[in-house]
Amino acid sequence: MGPPGAGKGTQAKKLVEKFGMTHLSSGDIFRAEKSSGSDLGKQLAQYMLAGKLVPDEIVVEMMAKAIADGDAEAGLMLDGFPRTVAQAKALDEQLAAAGSEMDAVVSIVVPDSEIVGRITGRRSCSCGQAYHVMFIPPKVEDVCDVCGAKLTQRADDTEEVVKERLEAYHAQTKPVIDYYSSCGEVRVLEVDGSKTPDEVSEDLAAALNALQQ
Ligand code: AMP
């Protein structure tokens, strides 16, 4: 968990490489549906482009399916879900019904003042490689180092939309961290997301390894 631009996707990918779980990103799942041009995708796009959260009923149904289809043996790394207390409760029910449970919640902490600069500089390639114009620039402007394709910017990574997303984070998603902290059954691990991606990843791996001991 973390505000937009905290590095959830980047850290989830690194952790998946280290620990071998399956990465399930609600944002990626919704963007794929949007790209398919389906009616559902068009509905999702309206919320995403406005920086609003997609309604819980839609999210819970789509994520329940993705989780049920996921490789439970390998373990799941949920990225961007749950984002409301209602989603967290629905997830609890699904996990309990499957005889499973959450091992830990990771909260990546980044001050609001850093968020807009982080987000508006983000660029990505369809091959999955992520860049930032200041912090992780490609060797040639707007061209992917890995595959040579032209880099793109997410349609919701504009200053105006980021402000909405940040508001949604504070109003609807932060209470989810309090929900897990107060239930006492799930460990909430906080990491300082202002450090470099490699440092954050080391801190996270250390915190998760400590959990397993
Ligand atoms: P992300 O890629 O995680 O930044 O998500 C991009 C956008 O997808 C968000 O700004 C929301 O509009 C939508 N979204 C992703 N995950 C959720 C969720 N769990 N609940 C509601 N909306 C979501």
Image (cartoon, rainbow, N blue to C red):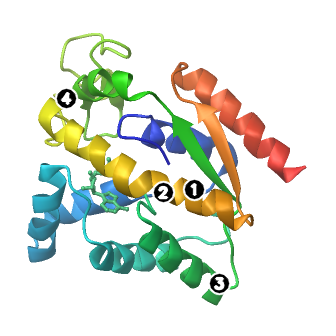
Identify the mark at residue 166; answer none if there is no mark.
none
Reading the image, the residue beneath label 3 is 96
- Number of numbered discs visible in the structure rendering: 4
4 and 3 marks in contact (CB < 8 Å)? no
Could you give the CA–CA distance between mark 1 and mark 2, rounded to whole angstroms? Answer: 5 Å
**Image coords of residue 125 (percent x, y):** 26, 34
Viewer-nearest of labels 2 and 4? 2
Query: Is label 1 in a helix, a strand or a loop?
Result: helix
Could you give the CA–CA distance between mark 1 and mark 4, rounded to whole angstroms? Answer: 37 Å
Which residue occupies the extreme right position in the image? 213
Is 65 above or below relative to 46? below
* Precedes in sequence: disc 2 or disc 4: 4
Reading the image, the residue beneath label 1 is 178
Query: Which amino acid type is marked by label 1?
Result: Asp
> In which quadrant of the rendered view does residue 44 lie?
bottom left
Reading the image, the residue beneath label 2 is 175
Is 156 above or below relative to 140? below
Query: Which amino acid type is marked by label 2?
Result: Pro
Query: Is label 4 in a helix, a strand or a loop?
Result: loop
1 and 2 marks in contact (CB < 8 Å)? yes
* Precedes in sequence: disc 1 or disc 4: 4
* Precedes in sequence: disc 1 or disc 3: 3
> In which quadrant of the rendered view does residue 161 lie?
top left
